[in-house]
Amino acid sequence: MFDKFGELNSYTEINELAENLFNEGDEKSLREMAKENGIQKDYVDLYLQGELPALCDQLTAALGKIDIEAKELKPKEIMEDWVEYLRGQCMESDLLARQVRKKGKSLKGCIAALLTWSFKNQQPVSKDILKAAGVSAGKVTLGIPGMARAKQIITDYYMGK
């Protein structure tokens, strides 16, 4: 995922590297670094043309990281909802956007935190529900967090609580 340039800790690190690559005239590496960090090609073009003072801001860096991680993880259904919630929260909170970009914080880790909660909080499903669903298993448990709980787990994961 961050194979060539490594996981960059902040939008500042991305911009410093972009500036160094630009000053060295290494457009190819600058484009590769931007792609590896989920920075859109349009931003790179504008930056190279001198129309943007920096390659990215905090939000662009956070959303880029989420996009790259989601592309690799391919979340489906409820996990897609969690990812969209995270994107929306980054748009509302500079602090969360900064935390998303931190080394060691990842979408994989966030979803793992949600899964951990799910396994620890499984509840038996009523036999009447199993019968209505046509499930013949003797015992079924379910532990998916409600959206309010999921939002708290996501926030706690990225904010380090």
Image (tube, helix red, strand yellow):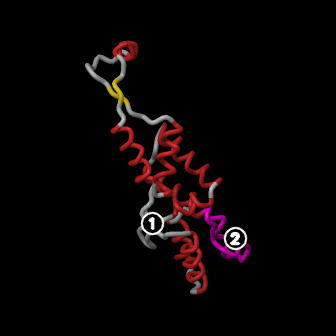
Q: Residue 17, image x and y in percent?
A: 54, 78
Separation of disc 1 and disc 2 at Cα?
A: 27 Å
Q: Quadrant of the N terminus?
A: bottom left
Q: Amino acid at mark 1?
A: Lys
Task: Indicate the quadrant where residue 142 lies.
Answer: top left
Secondary element under disc 2, as helix, strand or loop, is helix
The front one of 13 and 39 is 13
Mark with earlier residue (1, 2):
2
Whether residue 1 is in magenta: the answer is no
| Left or right: 90, with 122 as reference point | right
Residue plotted at (35% across, 32% down): 122
| Left or right: 136, with 99 as reference point | left
* The label number, if any, that marks residue 92 in the structure image: none
The residue range painted magenta reads: 39-60
| The furthest residue to the left | 138
The residue tagged 1 is: 103
The front one of 160 and 99 is 160
Circles 1 and 2 in contact, beta carbons < 8 Å: no
The residue tagged 2 is: 46
